[in-house]
């Protein structure tokens, strides 16, 4: 897809002193996101776009949204919209994001941002060239538990980090046509949920220098189980797992020389951390959140847009590139390729 030269948005940015949001794709996560958006005093959900007019109308009615569209393009062209949340299956993120950017819209794009590193590079390059905000919707980065985790590690209370164990697994009945198993819809546990433990590993120690990975493939040619070991400069190690085959603990534990730090189940939106020190002093920290936990990433986007910031310093383009480059390396290790994208 070729984009036109950078466009200067012609709309009145932040009408009513609120950030005006639109959503592309009226699926499951779109509904959860819409519910959390209602919690923000700084924003309003003004439009929904679905491929199906009735679906768009019913989503709009249910969520008290002023405008609905039966095409993604029509939403991208709506002059009243400031920022668009992309809530479609992974392989569509690239073209949906470029459509929004071409039409002068800021974008919050679901994870993974693209199907491979070259897509994410193009998306971030185009956002920069058009002077528009773009962020991957890695909501875990913004929940209070993650902020606390960073603070606890910085305090040195568990000492030098040794290794990380993090898993994300749930049992899902294989449906060859469903988003989780259909290869054309970007199926597989690695891209859908393996991205979370990989994100945590990168947040702690950056890109690994060595990666080992094993997977089990489904008849549809995607991974239903993926296990990864990362080595970070011959120092810290990460042992990560994702699966649709079983309900796993969904915990993240960082082991250090003086103790361990645990993000309790389901760690990617944890409300509890514990510090277990080798001297026997333990601490439990409770960090409840509002709504379903998406409000924190929403407020980060609002904050950036209100201040003319084009890239979040907490979830910068570099992190999205590092994430997808690491995923590409894991894909190569387990022999996973998405025909139209790799
Ligand atoms: N951050 C999180 O916690 C979280 C949780 C779940 C999912 N996600 C991410 O959000 C994205 C969507 O996941 P979801 O669970 O919401 O999926 P979903 O329920 O299947 O919804 C996806 C929507 O995308 C649209 N779409 C466009 N082209 C499509 C196609 N060819 N096939 C199917 N749908 C198509 C459809 O909306 P219309 O018919 O209305 O156009 C559909 O309802 C994924 O990339 C996933 O990784 C994130």
Image (cartoon, helix red, strand yellow):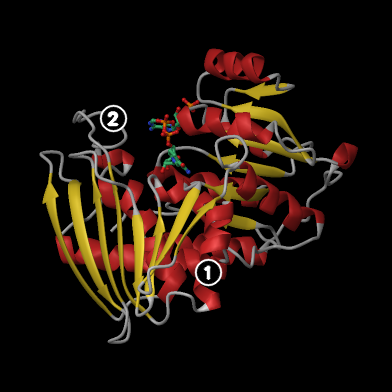
Relative side of 17 to 270, left or right: right
Relative side of 161 to 175, left or right: right
The secondary element bearing badge 1 is classed as: helix
Point out residue 68 in the picture as x, y percentages from the top left corner. Answer: 66, 22
Which residue in the protein does label 2 denote? 178
Residue 81 seen in the current view: yes
Relative side of 218 to 58, left or right: left
Mark 1 within 8 Å of ligand 1, using the beta carbon: no
Which residue in the protein does label 1 denote? 152
The secondary element bearing badge 2 is classed as: loop
Front-lying residue, 37 or 20:
37
**Residue shown at the point (18%, 31%) measured from the top left:** 174
Point out residue 35 in the picture as x, y percentages from the top left corner. Answer: 61, 29
Residue occupying the far front of the picture: 280
The tag on residue 76 is none
* CA neighbours of label 2 inside 10 A, class few (<14), some (14 to 19), many (20+): few
Q: How many marks?
A: 2
Question: What is the spatial separation of the Cα atoms under label 2 and label 1, in whole angstroms?
Answer: 40 Å
* CA neighbours of label 1 inside 10 A, class few (<14), some (14 to 19), many (20+): some
Front-lying residue, 297 or 316:
297
Point out residue 318 in the picture as x, y percentages from the top left corner. Answer: 52, 71
Mark 2 within 8 Å of ligand 1, using the beta carbon: yes
Relative side of 197 to 301, left or right: left
Labels 2 and 1: the sequence-earlier one: 1
Q: Are marks 2 and 1 in contact (CB under 8 Å)?
A: no
């Amino acid at each position: 897809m070729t984009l036109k030269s950078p466009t200067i948005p012609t709309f009145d940015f932040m009408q009513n002193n609120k950030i005006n949001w639109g959503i592309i794709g009226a699926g499951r996560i779109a509904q959860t996101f819409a519910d959390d958006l209602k919690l923000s005093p700084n924003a309003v959900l003004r439009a929904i776009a679905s491929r199906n007019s009735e679906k768009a109308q019913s989503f709009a009615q249910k969520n008290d949204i002023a405008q609905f569209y039966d095409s993604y393009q029509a939403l991208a062209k709506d002059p009243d919209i400031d920022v668009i949340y992309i809530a479609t299956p992974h392989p569509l993120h690239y073209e949906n994001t470029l459509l929004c950017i071409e039409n002068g819209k800021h974008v919050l794009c679901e994870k993974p941002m693209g199907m491979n590193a070259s897509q994410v590079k193009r998306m971030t390059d185009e956002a920069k060239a058009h002077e528009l905000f773009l962020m991957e919707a890695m909501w875990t980065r913004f929940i209070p538990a993650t902020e606390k985790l960073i603070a606890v590690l910085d305090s040195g209370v568990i000492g030098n980090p040794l290794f990380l164990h993090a898993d994300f697994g749930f049992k899902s009945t294989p449906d060859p046509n469903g988003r989780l198993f259909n290869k054309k819809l970007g199926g597989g546990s690695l891209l859908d949920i393996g991205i979370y433990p990989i994100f945590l590993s990168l947040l702690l120690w950056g890109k690994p220098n060595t990666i080992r990975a094993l997977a089990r493939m489904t008849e549809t040619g995607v991974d239903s189980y993926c296990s990864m070991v990362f080595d970070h400069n011959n120092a810290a190690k990460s042992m990560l797992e994702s699966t649709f085959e079983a309900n796993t603990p969904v915990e993240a534990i960082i082991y250090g020389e003086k103790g361990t730090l645990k993000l309790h189940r389901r760690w990617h939106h944890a409300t509890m951390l514990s510090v277990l020190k080798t001297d026997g002093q333990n601490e439990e920290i409770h960090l409840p959140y509002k709504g379903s936990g998406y409000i924190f990433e929403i407020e980060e986007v609002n904050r950036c847009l209100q201040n003319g910031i084009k890239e979040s310093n907490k979830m910068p383009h570099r992190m999205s590139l590092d994430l997808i480059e690491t995923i590409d390396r894991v894909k190569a290790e387990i022999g996973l390729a998405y025909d139209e994208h790799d």
